[in-house]
Amino acid sequence: MRGLFFLSLVGGLGLAALLTLGIWQMQRMTWKEGLLETIDARIAADPVPLPEAPNEAQDRYRAVAVTGEIEDQELHVFWVTKEAQTGYRIISPLVTQDGRRVLLDRGFVPSSAKDDMRSTGDSTIIGNLLWPDDGDWTTPAPEEDTNILYARDLTYMAERLGTEPVLIVARSSSLQAEVAPEPVTSAGIPNNHLQYAITWFSLAAIWAAMTAYFLRRSRAKSEG
């Protein structure tokens, strides 16, 4: 009887733990869906003037409209599109009408157009503020001699181009340019909590079945 009690205790505690993890993932899924809805609403909102001191916590994904001059300096960030086309995101300084210098992600060009001349000058930009998280500790360092970056590092780009560490990702531009905008979207933000929940609930079902099997087997032995 002592063995049956121990098996029942372990089985019950294990099942409770697995079910708790599954329920927690379902709660996380609801939270993430709400977060994505908030992000989508902020991305698609009517654009506002560029804040004087943008703050990541308050202004990330904020839609803005800015008029200024796109300068001809460029940084090229290696990129692969959703269609698996390789090329570069073009980062240039944008000098606003009130004299601020900020970073502008103009969009994507294929690899063959990396060194082409592109239109610059006065333009009205509609886009979104972004604090990118493209890279991590495995990201290669920038190649300054070939002007290739592997992540949109705000501090590095601002130092290279002499701007504020503020990045506007263009959604549209009044300037005719040879660059395809790559607007900010929530598509790349993962929401895998349903899969995780299914995994935990499946493990709970397997655990329950195994516990029941061992309890029946132990009971049969004790009765025999």
Image (cartoon, helix red, strand yellow):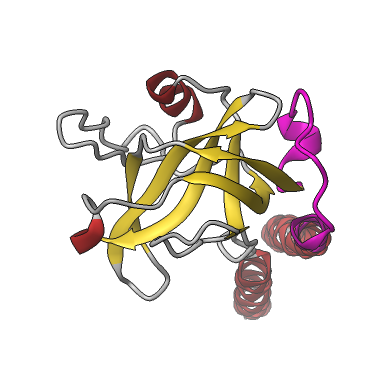
Q: Where is residue 77 drawn, in percent x and y?
A: 34, 45
Q: Residue furthest left?
A: 145
Q: Where is residue 175 drawn, in percent x and y?
A: 53, 56
Q: Is residue 140 left or right of residue 199?
A: left
Between 181 and 174, the one nearer to me in the picture: 174
Q: Residue furthest front?
A: 122
Image position of 175 with respect to 164: above or below: below
Q: Is residue 62 left or right of residue 101?
A: right
**Residue at the image point whose x is 32% and y is 53% from the top:** 88
Between 42 and 122, the one nearer to me in the picture: 122
**Residue at the image point whose x is 42% and y is 25% from the top:** 161
Residue 218 part of the magenta-drawn span:
no
Image position of 219 with respect to 29: above or below: below
Q: Which residues are magenta?
A: 35-62
**Is there any visible trace of residue 10 in the rendered image?**
yes
What is the count of numbered marks? 0
Residue 38 part of the magenta-drawn span:
yes
Q: Is residue 26 left or right of residue 191?
A: right
Image position of 59 with respect to 217: above or below: above
Q: Is residue 83 left or right of residue 174?
A: left
**Residue 55 position by quadrant:** top right
Q: On the rendered image, what quadrant is the N terminus found in?
A: bottom right
**Is there any visible trace of residue 9 in the rendered image?**
no
Q: Where is residue 138 drawn, in percent x and y?
A: 31, 37
**Residue at the image point whose x is 59% and y is 49% from the top:** 123
**Residue at the image point whose x is 30% and y is 70% from the top:** 85
**Residue 143 position by quadrant:** top left
